[in-house]
Image: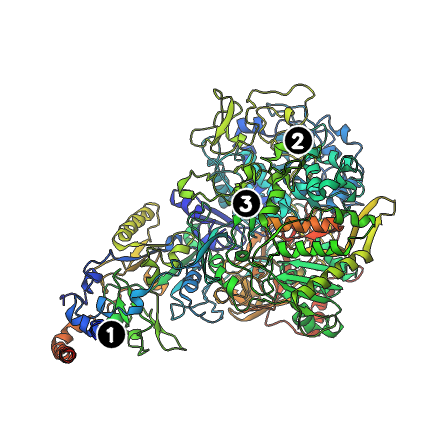
Amino acid sequence: MGVRTWIQDWPVYRQLTGTDPLGRGAAAQSPRSKALTARTETADSMARSVCPYCAVGCGQRIFVKDGEVVQIEGDPDSPISKGRLCPKGSASKSLVTSDRRQRTVLYRRPYGTAWEELDLDTAMEMIADRVLAARADTWEDTDPHGRPLNRTLGISSLGGATLDNEENYLIKKLFTAIGAIQIENQARI
Amino acid sequence: MAEAHPVGFQYVVDAKNRGAKVIHIDPRFTRTSALAHTYVPVRAGADIAFLGGIVNYILSNEKDFREYVVAYTNASMIVSEDFRDTEDLSGLFSGYDPETNTYDQTSWAYEGQQGDRETQDQDEAAIDRETASGLEQESHGPPVPADVPRDPTLQHPRCVYQVLKRHYARYTPEVVEQVCGVPREKFLEVCEAWTANSGRERTTALVYSVGWTQHSVGVQYIRTGAIIQLLLGNMGRPGGGVMALRGHASIQGSTDIPTLFNLLPGYLPMPHVQTHETFRQWIDAIRHPEQQGFWANAEAYAVSLLKAYFGDAATAENNWGYDWLPRLTGDHGTYQQVLNMIDGKVKGYFLLGQNPAVGSAHGKAQRLGMANLDWLVVRDLYLIESATFWRDGPEVATGEIVPAECKTEVFFLPAASHAEKEGTFTQTQRMLQWREKAVEPPGDCRSELWFFYHLGRMLRERLADSTAPRDRPLLNLTWDYPLHGERGDEPSGEDVLKEINGYDVATGAPLPGFAALKADGSTACGCWIYSGVFKDGVNQAARRKPGRDQDYVAREWGWAWPADRRLLYNRASADPDGKPWSERKKYVWWDPDAGEWTGYDVPDFEKTKAPEYRPPDGATGVAAISGDDPFIMQGDGKGWLYAPSGLIDGPMPTHYEPVESTVRNPLYTQQANPTRKVYDRSDNLTNPSPPERHTEVYPYVFSTSRLTEHHTAGGMSRQLAYLSELQPEMFVEVSPELAAERDLEHLGWAHVVTARSAIEARVMVTDRLTPLRIDGRIVHQLWMPYHWGGEGLVTGDSANDLIGITLDPNVLIQESKVGTCDIRPGRRPTGPELISYVQDYRNRAGLLPQHHTPMLTKDSDDG
Amino acid sequence: MGSNSLYGPLDPAPDAGYTDAPPRMGFFTDTSVCIGCKACEVACKEWNLIPDDGFNLLGTSYDNTGGLTANSWRHVAFIEQPAANRGGGTVDALAAAATIAPPGRQPEFLGMPMSDLPGRTIDAPRSDFRWLMMSNVCKHCTHAACLDVCPTGSLFRTEFGTVVVQEDICNGCGYCIPACPYGVIDQRKDDGRAWKCTLCYDRIGDGLMPACATACPTQSIQYGELDELRSRARHRVEALQEQGVTEARLYGHDPDDGVGGDGAFFLLLDEPEVYGLPPDPVVTTRDLPAMWKRAGVAGLAMAAAVVVSFLGGRS
């Protein structure tokens, strides 16, 4: 920065020489203020999404910079929401980015009194083993009249109303194929 | 609506600014009431009395839209002379069996049809209740034959119109006032506004939030609303309808593509061991061979689903794999499951974005059930109460759960958020909207698509060499989803959506819609009602033409099932001749020159079937629908004012008191729904209601609901600072009168007691709650939000701990919007003293081991 | 220096030295359609990355953030207005109940409700009980005392006529806080600096709406050119008056008021005091010009001398 620039940036100079003799406006504007721009404008990408809370289905725009979500706001194109969001929808960025969010697998062994760490692959293997064991232990081929049942009542599942259709489809398909029928979600509640 | 769906409420504000009158009916003055012209306080649990009063007003003043009613509803159909009404039988309909607490519905049939049903097995009604079969009719009516005697003059004493009129004749403004606590003038104001704003030129929308479903007569609440809307000609027309404001981003989708025990995708029933033993029985139970309507093609939908599931392994010879499907034997709903967990029958439990420790009725039963599993998998964004019950749950404080003695193995697997995966949500108007993925999920967070794909892959790998018959369906499952993404291990949501849409088995080409489905195995389709969402190979759910560049129907945004219809049954927006009822309300109409239906929406009718079309004798299925029958999924093409079959608890809605009430049913001997689903167990007690004794132990009515600032069980809101600061503590709202009666101090502590538990909350004394005069007595109501639990930035007791498990018989949803309780100043006891405190209340209320809440109420009970 | 730069009507941006200033921008907050959802509070915090205000149940209806603070730049006030005349206090419900016979199988109805509880009177049901809600915000005064007293130049007038604290300049002296006639601007405890609504200076510079107005579900918060908003507000009041909402009135819209009119003004349904707003705010620096006429010349001369010395040193 040359001295001239430095001086010309000095508020008092600008105040005395410019159009803002009281130094309350243009002369007082700091370089930071002058350079301010909305982070939605400088985002690397924007994904068009839908609010994850209630079933109104408000459109959201998710702005991403350097692989991080930097802003979530209403999508003005949506004929449902016209760009508006309620307090929960407006808090979506916190929902996604909060440091309170659990980002690693936790494991509590039987009779344990504290959480332990567990890597994801091991957890998946353990869960697969337990599904098969529970199914084997509780399998019912037929009812007392000899009619086919092909099922287990040893496995339950609850959830789906906050998930995608594609996810619910795979959940129901897989559970049906392994004979697990006790599949429920918030729609029953 | 302003409380729980603020962005949807913008349309109410718009309408109000254009001169619409806004009426809000609610037990408590809410943020919606604040903007309404008229607020009508009502007693929780008395909605059928209120709405039945409106039906009576319409019928006794002949305010119905007669031309619509005669042409489009079953008003003119003649009911069997065997039918007896609640007016004749002290609150029961004919056919009640006190052994099973269900109805033989034979006598409810139309004239001349009851003989067809004499084969009805006495326990079929019980099976229907246990399997929530009413849900299977979300998209179609139960079976009725096509040709029914009719009296278009509506004068026949047994025509539906007259039956309805007699049934509701006693629901006078005086009775509404007596039962609901609504002054007659207020009630008549509602009646006049609703009827004046309905008819040829105007329509009225009925919007409810799904608290309506959470009653022991929940389905009949909504039925009553539907009867009013049919009588006033508000169905299938713009600005009309009955609209549910649902509470989760894709709760509609999770019903359409169900994660529900009794359904397969597209409302096909899960096979029942007895009624669906063979493939043919299953198909015929869905399509009813003699019936009209689009369900006649059910075999094509069902076979295509099995082809989508089992691919080449599904052949005509093996009934497309039908025999591999698991069978229901009764009630396998979430509450039955939890009680089975307590009884040690369930080994493993998956929780997928759901927090039953706080969000389901009877929190203690939920937590004790989870504490008695072999293993539990919790998939969520945050550590919710259902993941930490073994360490921090209320039962740890009371000693009912001892961590070192709790065997449940718990896996917490962090989930991907909505920003971290692609896929569709189906919002509350049946519209699918595609979400683009913004970022990769962090750490171990994964989508359910990832989790279930890989779980399935691993199970299949483990069983690859199995020859056991039970493993055939898993090994035959089509599960070869290509993997993508930065880690190269993520299935593509679009690939799954294409399977849901359906494809030609030979070419793999996407199908244009459900009309293209075949029963010969040449098509596969994961959910027939969603067929068309990938029409032309284009993800129709991802369409995003800005709303401002379209007309108000906005058909180029997202995709709505079925067949992208935005308004169901929209044939009814035109008169029987196919002309719009009025220019002002035109929506879909017949273009005689082009020989087709046209308008602002996809016509919900065969495009080229003329209004004057009449089916030939003996026609069935789609061909049997007349050109003036708009309700094309119903067995008779009509909107049903009277349900001759299909509902467990009666052909017409009838006021029953909530299971827990402080009031003796002023209308009938029968106190509560005589067909409700109960679990009569010592760990699921019900507070006494009249005419039982000791009702004074739990003298107040309570209701629970949401706050704008929080979301259901709090897992997505109490973890966030910006929401937690807005509503930081559990509280209970009471009127100044109740506060005075119980010495409750504003902002002080109070505790609320039921037969299940006692919880504490801070007191909010507010004029937004008001005592009501019911049947000559003062009834105090109090209100609580149900968002709190032990985890998060803000914590507190859970209102759902107060609520017991009693279910609506049609859909097995719990009564959690009304109950009775006591409220006392100060905090509740802690530790084991809490248990003895609650037990003392039970003792005083007579809830002793030999006590059973009666289902059937007799005159002599009033003693 | 214009003679009325510290008082009376004017267009503040040109007055503050912007030669080709864009139109003055502001908020019109129409409380008659506010549903108290607080989306404005959350959207503001998410955008401006503001700390939470603590988790305290205040018991003032549904308001738990308490007011505009350094950490709450939008604040929704809730006012529960019971019936003006509750007819002799609370109802003795037990006594009333005791007069009624126990219900039998032929229940008889024993007359009309006896109290004037909300929704219970026939004569004047709507005026009986009101739940007023208002999203409050910095007023962005035409004559902003906070700005006038700021010794560091941290507070400044933007080209949009809004008043913004520059966080890189503020040294936490706190002079602005007592100067505000509305009690809006506030010091943040941990860093000592002053904070308040910027009218999303970073967004509006890019042609976007402020975060609160973007989110507001019912358009209670409207953002736009102040002249246009004022005219819109006049029409809105007229429309409401015609609908019988005679209590509708504007607040902060008048350029002749004590602060020269607000850049953020309101449609209220009751007296300003009911919402916690001062009925007749006056810029606290109203008398400054007279003082400056005595003291200003000396100060300016000193400042000029400093500049000259710099200029001299340059060559």
* Residue in the image at 63% along x and 43% along y: B499
Q: Secondary structure at mark 2?
A: loop
Which one is earlier in the sequence, the residue at label 3 or at label 2?
3
- Where residue C56 appears, x then y in whole percent? 49, 71
Total number of numbered labels? 3
Q: Give the residue pinned by disc 1.
A: C149
Q: CA distance from mark 1 to mark 3?
A: 56 Å
- Reply above or below: A119 against B471: below
Q: Secondary structure at mark 1?
A: helix
Residue B506 is left or right of residue C300, and the answer is right
Q: Residues within 10 Å of mark 3 (few under 14, many from 20)?
A: many
- Nearer to us: label 3 or label 2: 3
- Where residue B382 appears, x then y in whole percent? 59, 65
- Reply above or below: B698 against B635: below
Q: Quadrant of residue B230?
A: top right
Q: Give the residue pinned by disc 2.
A: B635
- Where residue B697 appears, x then y in whole percent? 67, 62
* Dot 1: chain letter: C
* Residue in the image at 31% along x and 50% along y: C237
Say whether mark 2 and mark 1 are on the same chain. no
- Nearer to us: label 1 or label 3: 3
Say whether mark 2 and mark 3 are on the same chain. yes
- Asked if marks 1 and 3 touch (Cβ < 8 Å), the reply is no
Q: CA distance from mark 1 to mark 2?
A: 78 Å
The type of residue carrying mark 1 is Val
- Reply above or below: B708 against C313: above
Q: Secondary structure at mark 3?
A: strand
Q: Give the residue pinned by disc 3.
A: B432
Residue B254 seen in the current view:
yes
The type of residue carrying mark 3 is Leu
